[in-house]
Amino acid sequence: MSRIGNKPVTLPPKVDVTINGQEIKVKGAKGELTMSAHPEMIIERQDGVILVKRPTDERRHRALHGLTRALIANMVTGVSEGFQISLLVEGVGYTGEVRPNKDLAMKLGFSHEVVVNPPPDISFEVEGKNPTTIRIKGIDKQVVGQVAANIRSLRPPEPYLGKGIRYSDEIIRRKEGKAGKGK
């Protein structure tokens, strides 16, 4: 029994869902998202909730049941509230700034600035006082996460000094360095 797949997706006010066969369109205050569900999943709308049902109890149907429901719930959350991921830039002289053309320019210890162009529906935000906190905002959870992972991969955190780009909730295990120095 799928616990996630059996939960109904409640629709907040001002969110419109259109189900056309396996094509699902979710439209809200922040934008519009479209998804094509697996042909074997049954998607129904009843009294302000969306229900996802599976045809059998086969292993792949159980997996698709929870996945489909989670993807629809993420679409509803994205168009109503949006998603954001915070990254911390740590290191002497490591900073980020958002340019007027919406690009993110970062100084990461290289001989040049690293410029990241945002995909459609993604915006960057850098706090004014603290130019080491970067927020990535958008309506599609997968795209927001992928952009954050791409930015983090530009300068991953290293374990000796902790320099680099890390997620705000990520904990970096620090290493000691040369243990026998001076003996």
Image (tube, rainbow, N blue to C red):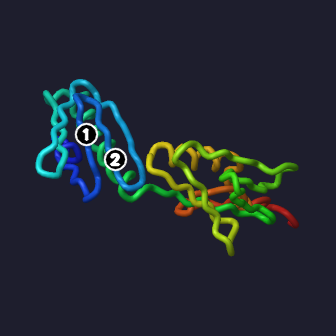
Q: Nearer the viewer, residue 43 or 164?
A: 43
Compared to 34, does 169 lie above or below? below
Q: How far separated are the C-alphas under marks 2 and 1? A: 8 Å
What's the residue at 63%, 50% (across, down)?
A: 152
Packing grade of label 1 (10 A; few <14, some 14-19, many >=20) is few
Packing grade of label 2 (10 A; few <14, some 14-19, many >=20) is many
Residue 121 at x, y = what percent? Answer: 52, 47
What's the residue at 49%, 52% (across, down)?
A: 138
Which numbered disc flags the more N-terminal residue, 2 or 1? Answer: 1
57 vs 136, left or right, is: left
2 and 1 marks in contact (CB < 8 Å): yes
Residue 144 at x, y = what percent? Answer: 51, 48
Regarding residue 112, the answer to whether it shows in the image is yes
154 vs 79, left or right, is: right
Please tell me how many numbered marks the rendered image carries. Answer: 2
Quadrant housing the N terminus: top left
Regarding residue 176, the answer to whether it shows in the image is no
Q: Nearer the viewer, residue 161 or 23?
A: 23
Q: Nearer the viewer, residue 157 or 81?
A: 81
Q: Nearer the viewer, residue 155 or 106?
A: 106
What's the residue at 80%, 65% (across, down)?
A: 92
The residue carrying mark 1 is 18
Quadrant housing the C terminus: bottom right
Residue 60 at x, y = what percent? Answer: 25, 28
Identify the amino acid type marked 1.
Answer: Thr
* Disc marking residue 27: 2
Circle 1 SS class:
strand
Identify the amino acid type marked 2.
Answer: Lys
Compared to 10, does 181 lie above or below? below
